[in-house]
Image: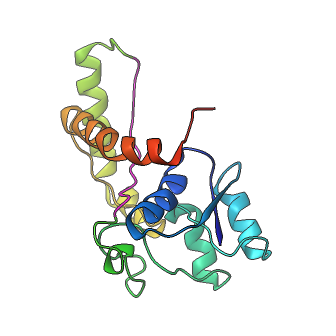
Amino acid sequence: MSYGHAGNGTSTHLAGELLKNLAKVDIGAIPYKGGVPAINDLLGGQIPLSFNNGPESVGQIAAGSVRALAVTTASRATFLPDVPSMAEAVPGYDTGVWWGLLGPAGMAPDLVTKLSHDFVAALNTDAVKERLAKLGAAPIGSSPAQFDATIHADYAKWGPIIKAAGIKAE
């Protein structure tokens, strides 16, 4: 069996590789140039499975065009409460995808503080929270230090998976 994903080294690719690693299943990865082309081939029957991020697939799920089999977070998603988490079947499975705001190395500390403050304030508005929830995302709004810790923790988590899968930068 094979699965589509948004491209080599993407979160959706790593989601499939984590499943292979933890569940010891042999599924082949098919890279696409983004999640939407993978969903299109899933809709057209060219591939049997696809790992996709919530925001790009929630519309197709709501329309009934694709069936959500599992979410790849440690617990069920609030926007898909009837869909099990992968961790319910595969202990330890969690992709915990995040998006973040990054700047160039050496950015002035006062600018980092201001941008972080403004970004967190925007994330905490009702309009943004509501919009993100409809897309299957939840705002966190951590500090720069917390975000840095998340990046380093993910590097430690995903490094062995990337190495085992032989994923190379393109």
127 to 100, vertically: above or below: below
| Quadrant position of the N terminus in the picture | bottom right
At a point 63% along the width and 48% down the height, the residue shown is 7
Q: Residue at x 23, y 26 (%)?
A: 113
Q: Is residue 153 left or right of residue 12?
A: left
Q: Nearer the viewer, residue 116 or 54?
A: 54
Instruction: Magenta stretch: give its range.
Output: 94-104
Which of 51 and 169 lies nearest the eye of the viewer? 169
Q: Position of residue 25 (x, y in %)?
A: 50, 70
Task: Tell me: residue 11, above or below residue 45.
Answer: above
Q: For residue 95: magenta? A: yes
Residue in view at x 51 percent, y 81 percent = 69
Quadrant in the rendering for residue 21: bottom left
Residue 163 magenta-highlighted: no
Q: Residue 42: where, in percent of width, then height?
A: 71, 72
Quarter holding the C terminus is: top right
- Establish if 57 lies above or below 117: below
Horizontal and vertical percent for residue 65?
Answer: 68, 82
Residue 157 screen position, x and y as percent: 31, 46
